[in-house]
Amino acid sequence: MEMNATYTSFVAIGDSFTEGMSDRLPDGSYRGWADVLAARLAARTPGFRYANLAVRGKLIGQIVDEQVGVAAALRPDVVTLVGGLNDTLRPKCDMGMVRGRLEEAVERLAPSCKKLVLMRSPGRNGPVMERFRPRMEELFVLIDELASRHGAEVVDLYGAPVLGDPRMWDVDRLHLTAEGHRRVAEAVWRALGLPPEDDWLSQLAAAVPTRWGARRVDDLRFAREHLFPWIGRRLTGRSSGDGRSGAHFSAELGRAFWVTPEDGGAPGPVTTWRRLDPDE
């Protein structure tokens, strides 16, 4: 790995984890680890370009069909690919299909960029995690194999105990909090060979025990606001990503576009960056 490397462009593809849920900004939009990472990279590289193509709810086949070719066409320095976990959480999951589509994605992306980053996704400790753990670990074995074969980096979030702590997860129990996303950004930053800025693996302070009644209230809120709607979408064949495009993808033009900070010395939030014209 090249230490203290310089990267001029970054494309992020995947599902809600990379889109940034549930790291919500005051205006209702999402930030997430990829935007945090992009801002940090931009602060050290004039003219930095970024595109986030991730869309919530996407399965690996949809990521490959809708995002991989678009990302490869941009020829970025860095591509991050996180996908397949939504497939493993479905009651019926064809792991052979997941393997084939993920292999296809890596084979197409690796030659198109200088650095391909894959991840072993984090999981919130609890009964849902235990139920789907065997599928997840099968997926992670494949990710390790593909990374070794194609020279990609693997960020092991699954092996970080702190990211299994329920306090790192939003009330929907599916998405990381802002602090969780910040730690993921630091983990990817290090995987790119850049000097560490903090200890993303540090444990949280001991938790204060929650009363039984408060836990039941939280469980009921979770079921009403998140679990039942999720089940309803599964039963009706709908997805939270239906009709959505990535933040930096033009559905009208059928292509992605770069964004870049107005002031490279003080990049600010990605939501304030300007869109680049195709000839810039």
Image (spheres, rainbow, N blue to C red):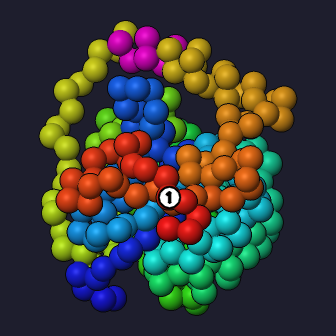
The residue singled out by tag 1 in the image is: 276
Q: Residue at x 79, y 33 (%)?
A: 238
Q: Position of residue 241 (x, y in %)?
A: 68, 39
Q: Quadrant of residue 236?
A: top right
Q: How many marks?
A: 1
Q: Residue at x 57, y 77 (%)?
A: 75
Instruction: Read off the magenta span.
Output: 214-220
- Magenta span main SS: helix
Task: Please give left or right for residue 211 compared with residue 127 in the image.
Answer: left
Q: Residue at x 33, y 40 (%)?
A: 178
Q: Position of residue 97 (x, y in %)?
A: 80, 66
Disc 1 packing (10 Å; few <14; some 14–19; many ≥20): some
Front-most of residues 135 and 193: 193
Q: Residue at x 52, y 55 (%)?
A: 52
Q: Inspect the magenta stretch and tell me whether residue 80 lies in it.
A: no
Q: Position of residue 155 (x, y in %)?
A: 41, 69
Could one spot residue 122 in this view of the protein?
no
Task: Please give left or right for residue 94 compared with residue 102 in the image.
Answer: right
Front-most of residues 279 and 201: 279
Looking at the rendered structure, the kind of residue marked 1 is: Leu
Q: Is 280 rendered above or below residue 261?
A: below
Q: Quadrant of residue 125?
A: top left
Could one spot residue 265 in this view of the protein?
yes
Q: Quadrant of the N terminus?
A: bottom left
Secondary structure of residue under mark 1:
loop
Q: Is 17 rendered above or below residue 30?
A: below
Q: Quadrant of residue 165?
A: top left
Q: Inspect the magenta stretch and tell me whether residue 217 lies in it.
A: yes
Task: Please give left or right for residue 94 compared with residue 76 in the image.
Answer: right
Q: Position of residue 78 (x, y in %)?
A: 46, 74
